[in-house]
Image (cartoon, rainbow, N blue to C red):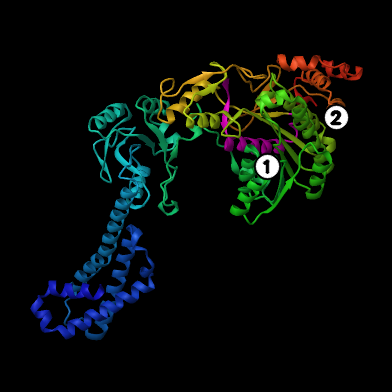
Amino acid sequence: MGAAALFLALVLRLDLNRVLANLPEYGLAAIIFGAVVGIVGFVLGMNRGVWRYASLPDLVAIIKAATIAVSIFIVAHFLLVRLEAIPRSSMIIAWAFLIVLLAAPRAVYRVYRNWRDTRRDVRRDGGVAKRVLLIGAGDNSETFLKTIAERSGQAFEVLAIIDERGRRTGRFIRGVPVLGSLEKLPQIIRRFDRQGRRPEALILTRTRDDYERHARMQDLIDIASEHHLEMLRLPKVLDLRELGSEMDVRPIKLEDLLQRKPLQLNLPKMATMIKDQKILITGAGGSIGSELVRQIVALEPASLILVDASEYLLYAIDAELRRNNPQYDLYPLLCNVREREGIARIIDMHQPDVIFHAAALKHVPIVEAQPLEGLFTNAIGTRNVAEAAVRAKVGAVVMISTDKAVNPANVMGASKRMAEMFCQAMDLSAGKTGTRFVTVRFGNVLGSAGSVVPLFEKQLKAGGPLTVTHPEIERYFMTIPEACLLVLQSAAHSLEEPEERGRIFVVDMGAPVKIADLARNVIRLSGLRPDIDVNIVYTGLRPGEKLYEELFDARETLGQTDIEGILVAFPRAIECGVILRIFDEMRRLIDAHDLAGALRLLKSTVTEFNPGEEVLAMMKGGPYTLPPELVALTSDTGHEKSDAGDH
């Protein structure tokens, strides 16, 4: 191409007859110039580029190579023959020809490959592509259009782009028209419908936060539902080099169903607690535990001790970590926190600096049917971890609790409240033990195992109906990553404030969400209409289930922290000696399989516990009565403090 560029430049600058008359001289010059171009291109690595993905950086490299080659040739020619015979302007023309001749084959090949791949995909897919509208006339839309035009395996036909800000209406992005703002979306859909090209989906190209600066997400969901359109989204950043053969288009995130912005916390502050420390996580294979592990790994701990009672869950999180983070020391250990000697042996052997206690039985109906199992794991298991941590002089234990522990109506919530009380008492006596205990309380977690949204999605795939227990039931929701950030941030804050003991950290979760509204949004995001395409069936409250959850008890004193979105509660406290005697008695009752006695002790300890009829019936069985000393201790309000800080 270098030789051809100079030869064409000479023909253009002089004339063909004159060039042919001096062909040996001009031919030799063209060959030498071609050799210079070849050497420069080789040194710059132009031969290593993949023509299939030629783009603007390749054009810049071509211009650079052409400029260097022409400069070298001019200097060499001047030193040898003082630029005689070859007009100087011909070198500028040769520079331009060289750029065209090097760039054109790459561009032609790329266009050909795109055309060939598109035809192949059309034949493979039977010529059917999903018609979509892009929401957002920005960089992500341009990258998406570019990618589906170039890569194989795409099944989208982009009809138009909707600009929610309305600034680019009437313009084009890669040949696709920007037709209007969100207000005109119904008209645009009907226009394509009349043309026989009805869109099947809307693709949100912006992040939720970016989009909601100019429009409401709920309005978009309502329009999609009304017109029977599926709602999809693009990743936050589209980087062509990181995409696989399939464009990464997914359903709208569960976070988009929240009626508030996801919590963003201070990662550097958390890193000081984790970096170069030995961290142990119980329940490491569960929904919360596994996400905790992922976020802790990013903060560079010295080692991770993963404890879980499930072999498969432990294997899964261990395999994921070894694949993505092979540099860390990982210790996957099978153990149930109910095994006092087993968990103590693990903690003594590994001497962790911080323990995150996420192991628990959390499903209300299952624990309601088997109260002793819930008490054994949630209450006694917490004690086993706490006491082993104190003996091993662990720096801190972070216990993960639930909003169901507030005025509990079920055994699961009451058992977690007992665990809170034990950790609170241990933290108040931390001046003697040295181990800090931090309790973190949050609401329902979107996407966790057994949570409502995956159940709705499964029911939707089966054709419905979606089941909700009561039309008015509502819950606080947060995402799994958000819940784990809360745990880490609260722990870091508590450890920085050693004088603040016996407190419970709670996220400000905004307004609760009605489960029925959540079900309707799940249906809408799938392009279906609630109560028309998919019904919602109300099945009645389950045993132990409340209509409304609470994050704080009315008797708890609330306080602010210096962390946006995190509050602190000061619940009533029981002295450490008293709680130890209560837990000793609870363990004895569990070992004796005395269900009625264990439930009565639970009720007398967690006085705000309001059990349902089924649990009340269980409490009536058997001859058990509380020992006189425990009756006095658990009913003695003199042990309660309005502010745990007084201790």
Local secondary structure at mark 1: loop
Q: Residue furthest left?
A: 17
Residue 180 within the magenta-colored segment of the rendering: no
Q: Rate crowding at label 2 as few (under 14), some (14 to 19) or many (20 or more) other CA atoms within 10 Å.
A: few
* Cα–Cα span, label 2 and label 1: 27 Å
Q: State the mark number for residue 284.
A: 1
Comparing 86 with 9, the one in front is 9
**Residue 264 is at least partly visible in this image:** yes
Q: State the mark number for residue 591.
A: 2
Name the quadrant containing residue 217.
top left
Residue 79 image point, x, y percent: 27, 83
Residue 227 image point, x, y percent: 34, 27
Quadrant of the drawing holding the C terminus: top right
From the viewer's perspective, is 483 left or right of 30?
right
Compared to 52, does 27 lie above or below?
below
The kind of residue on which mark 2 rests is: Asp
The kind of residue on which mark 1 rests is: Ala
Magenta-highlighted residues: 474-502
Residue 500 within the magenta-colored segment of the rendering: yes
